Every structure is written in C-alpha cells, then in structure tokens.
Image (tube, coloured by chain):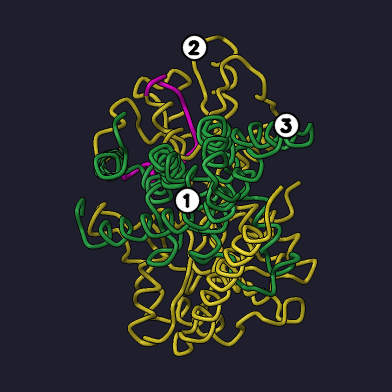
Chain colours: A yellow, B green
Amino acid sequence: MVKKVDRKRILALLILILIMIVSAIIYWKYLTPSVKVLRVSTTTSLYATGLLDFLADEFKKMRPNVVIQFIAVGSGAALKLAEKGDVDMVFVHAPNLEKEYIEEGILINGTIFAYNNFIIVGSVNDPANISNCDPVEAMRRIYETGEAGKALFVSRGDNSGTHQRELLLWRLAELNATGKSWYIETGSGMSETLLVANEKDAYTLTDTGTYLKLKRENKLPNLETLVDEGFVLLNIYSAYIVNPDVHPHVKYDLAMDFLLFVISNEGQELIGSYGVEEFGVPLFYPAKGKENDLYSAWLWFANQP
Amino acid sequence: MVLSSEVLEITIRSLMISSTATILSSSWSIPLSLRLSSSHSKLTNLIVSIFNALIGLPTVIVGLFLYMLLSRTGPLGFLQILYTPIAIILGEAILITPLIVSLAYEVFYKARVEYWEVALTLGADTYQAYRTMLRETLSDVIIIFLIAFSRALGELGVALIVGGNIRGFTRVFTTTIALEIAKGNFEFALTLGLILLIIISTITAIIRILGVRRE
C-alpha cells in the first residue's frame, strides 16, 4: 500500500512535469513573437540537393525575421502533411499525386518553379544497348535483355517521385517488371539504390543531382549516363500553398511572399546557378519563360493513370 | 565541414533533448516501478509483462502515434508542439518508459527482499523504507538512466517523425545521419556516427566512475 506521503510526492512530481511542459510551450509560443515561422513540407530527394535551404537563406537576407522550416519526407507524406494542416506550403515533383490534392481543394496557387531530367544510368558495357535511345524503347530493351538473363534493373520500390516515374515508363512500354528475377527493389533512397546498381552492374532510373554527386566522388565507377533525353524523363518541380479556407491557421501571406520570391527574376537566377560551381552543370533549370510548355507537360503527367 | 559549428550545435541539441527526455521519463517511470515492485498481485504481473513487451516497440510506431496525436487536426493539435524539440522530448520520454520501468522494477523487486524488511524491522516507516531502498539501489538506477539515455540519443523514428529534422531547430544526430546518407555523404555520416559513439561512451564512462559503486 502506498502511504499518503508517497502519494503527495508523486503528485508533486506530476505537477512539476506539468509545469515543465506548460512553461516550455509558453516559452515557445510567446517569448519568440518577433520570428515568423513558415513551414514547408518537401520530398527528401529535393531537400537533399540543398536547393531549398539555399533559397531560404537568400530569402532570409531580405526578411530576417522569417524562419523557413523544411520537413523532408516522401512525396506522399509531404502532401499528407498539407492535408493534415501541419505545414503552410509544399514543394514537390509528383504531378499525378499533386492532382488529387488540388482537386480536393487542399492545395492552391500551384506554381511550377523549376525542372530537370531524370536519367537512365547503367553499366558501361550496356548489355541492352540503350545508349541514347528513346526512354520507353530503352525500358523495352532492358526488359528483353533481363528476360534473357543478361541485364539487371534496380528499382527504388518506395513509391517516391522517382519510383512513380519508373513505373510510368514501364506502363508506357506496356511491360510489367514486378516480380521478375532480374528486377531488384531496394525500398530505399536514391544513393543506396545507385550503389546497388553500381555493385550489380545494373540499370536504374535516377535524378541528376544524386547521380552527379556520387559520380564525382568516384563511388559509381561502373555506371554511365545512357539515356538523358526524352519528354517522359522531364522532372517538374511545383510549389503550392495550403488552402487557408481548409486550414485557417495557414500563413498565407508569408507563404505567398516566399512563393513570389522563388519565381522572381532573382529567385529563378539562383535556381539556375545552383550546383554549377560544384558539378560544372546546373542541377535545376528555372521555369521562367517556359511556363506554358511546362504546364502542358505537367497536365500530361498528372493525367497518367 | 566535419567539425563545423553546425555539428557542435547538433551535438548540444541532441544531448539536451535526450537528457531532458530521460529525466522526464524517469519522473514517472521510477515512481511507477517502485509502486509495482511493492505489489504481488496478478494485475502487477500483467502490467510488468506489458511493459516488458513494449520495450521492443519500433520507434517509428511511437513517432507515428505521437504524430497523429499532435498533428493540427489531431486531438492534441491545439498545443502546437509538433515539429518542435518539445515533441521529440515527449516522444523519446514515452519511448524509453517501458525500458526504465522494466529494468527498475527488477532492481527494486530484488532490493525489496534485501532492504525493505530490514528497514521496517529497524523501525522505519514506509517512506523511510522507500528512501533506504532508493539509496541502496542508486548505482543500478544510474545505469538504467544511462541505458535509457543512450536509447533516446540513438533512436531515429521519433525524432524524424515528430521533430521533422528541421535545420537549426529539431535536427539531431540520428536525423542528420539519415539526411547525409540520403545526400550520399557516406563518409560524413560515418564521422557523425563516430562522434555519437564517442560522446555516448565518454558520458557513460564519466557517470559510471562518479556514480556507480563497486561492490
């Protein structure tokens, strides 16, 4: 049996904990009023390039009292956070997923701010002979060579933006590689997937940023860029604001300021120059001047099954 | 870049979050295990078994559960603590609760036999008996703190899901390592892992020397 005096002590302890938590919340909410926080969810691959932190730092130079917090998660989760009202803005590159949230009225002010290309990389020997051919034809050749037991393909298998695009390529080629012995699903990030492809002399679909980084560090000696051109490899990055009619606490004005900065002349120049110094080529191309073409491309991708 | 001020900042933040979580968790886990150790009912056995089983709960599950609670549209959304260090502290405190309760229960249960009866025979009241028992088991309790602290410092799921790995705000050791792996900076990730290991070993060594009595 616990005696009265112990009960009191336990109660005192509980009160102490409560005070700790409450004071922390009060501290957080009221003692830092001069700083405005803008929360943005985004995909890991985009965040890992460092572009978003770079843009946020430049924005902060003009608006020192604004803190932009990026939450980097998978494409699906990034949009889910917007639906739950936990972020003010979203930066993503998965048109077919974005479309659902636009239709539900959760995301507004959709703006394409940058683009680049996915690339198909593979063994230097290129057993399926896909070098410089059309991306969909490349997938067909990989399939045939794989069936013949002479090639392997490594897939992200994690429902990421890159994985979604790979699945679209298989669908366009009217083939289903899932479950084949030559089709390896890693279920992990792009870096890990590229390393697996390198070890196994296999083909894979990748974004340029991750590939160039690992290639430059000599971690992918067995891989080469084989296909880097074709409409279906276009990778379109869009920004959205969470609808304040759905989630009234969304900092719409602040989000709009950041969005306008990203598509301003200055922001677009920053995007186009990002990574040039490090990799010799830009990692992203600014959307400015190509808005209409990019939008029709976005529509096409968004409406793929 | 390896030993930049950002690494230092992440180190300090990680230590503060995990130690606060350990203290917070102990503040309810230790009284609970004391209480449990003084009872022999079937219900107590059941509760202890449940806590034993919960030790193995994946950290991402705890993180996801807490996310659902703390999300703006969740039941505790009004607190607005999602994606703050407070959320990580809370999550890690919950995560290590079964660990502390299970280990402390064993220690107190054994100590009861040794010290409890003796203390009562010598004329102590229940409160004094508890104190004697706590004093005698202090070495073991400190080791339990260390284990719990290491678990909190080394976990990834909770920090990633409810902390959000926000630069300069909720970025801790494990989330940084995960991000650097995603970036392909494997050497840097390994370096961070090494730093984490050195910190944990140093703290453990210091506390053991200071607080753990050799029998």
Vertical arrangement, residue B87 with respect to residue B181, above or below: below
Residue assigned mark 2: A150
Q: For the point 44% across and 41% down, which residue is it?
A: B141
Q: Which residue is mark 1?
A: A45
Amino acid carrying mark 2 in the image: Lys
Quadrant position of residue B211: top left
Coordinates of residue A220 in the picture (x, y in percent): 31, 31
The region drawn magenta spans A199-213
**Viewer-nearest of labels 1 and 3?**
3
Labels 1 & 3 near each other (Cβ < 8 A): no
Q: Is residue A41 visible?
A: yes
Mark 2–mark 3 contact, CB under 8 Å? no
Query: Would you say B22 lies left or right of A141 here?
Result: left
Residue designated by label 3:
B45
Sequence-wise, the earlier of marks 2 and 1 is 1
Select label 2 or label 3 by which is in front.
3
The CA span between labels 2 and 3 is: 59 Å
Give the residue at x 40% y 64%.
B167
Q: Tell me the element at label 3.
A: helix
